[in-house]
Image (tube, helix red, strand yellow):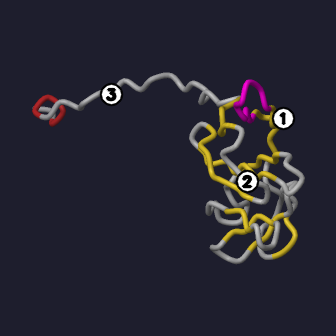
Amino acid sequence: MCVSMLYPVARYISPPEVPEASTQSVVAGREGDLKPNQGKIFRFGEQPGILVRTEDGGYRALSATCTHLNCTVQFRGDLKQIWCACHNGFYDLSGKNVSGPPPRPLEEYKVNVADGEIVVSRA
């Protein structure tokens, strides 16, 4: 007798591969949440983003995933830079990697303020 008759092989149905839906915009906060020279992490779909209020009152938003080893970065108001604590990497407020091991810039997002909400979207 064939072994497969004694122990039937389980057959699994796999769903078709579908490209993951990507988030195009999110509300990252409300006006007044951040004081000048402050930053905060927000969720941009499945990834973290970072929103920074500059000294002049404007907003900058970037991916908060370090391009070195995918650690989450944070805003250092004392240095006016974005910092990755994992390996002491630094980015400027436009996301450009300026020191440490990060090999490339952070993804920059577009910021719009409407009706008191800070809306961040992919550029």
Report the side of 94 relative to 4 (left or right): right
The answer to whether residue 119 is magenta is: yes
The answer to whether residue 61 is magenta is: no
Compare residues 8 and 93 and report the one nearer the observer. 93
Q: CA distance from mark 1 to mark 2?
A: 24 Å
Q: Amino acid at mark 2?
A: Lys
> Residue 55 at x, y = what percent?
86, 57
Q: Which residue is mark 3?
A: 12
Q: Quadrant of the C terminus?
A: top right
The 10 Å Cα crowd at callout 2, few under 14, some 14 to 19, many 20 or more, is few
Q: Secondary structure at mark 3?
A: loop
Q: Residue at x 73, y 60 (%)?
A: 67
> Residue 105 at x, y = what percent?
83, 57
Q: Which is in the foreground here, disc 1 or disc 2?
A: 2
> Residue 90 at x, y = what percent?
79, 70
Report the side of 104 relative to 29 (left or right): right
Q: Secondary structure at mark 2?
A: loop
The chief SS type of the magenta part is strand
Number of the label disc, if any, that sits on residue 123: 1
Q: Which residue is mark 2?
A: 35
Q: Which is in the foreground here, disc 1 or disc 3?
A: 1
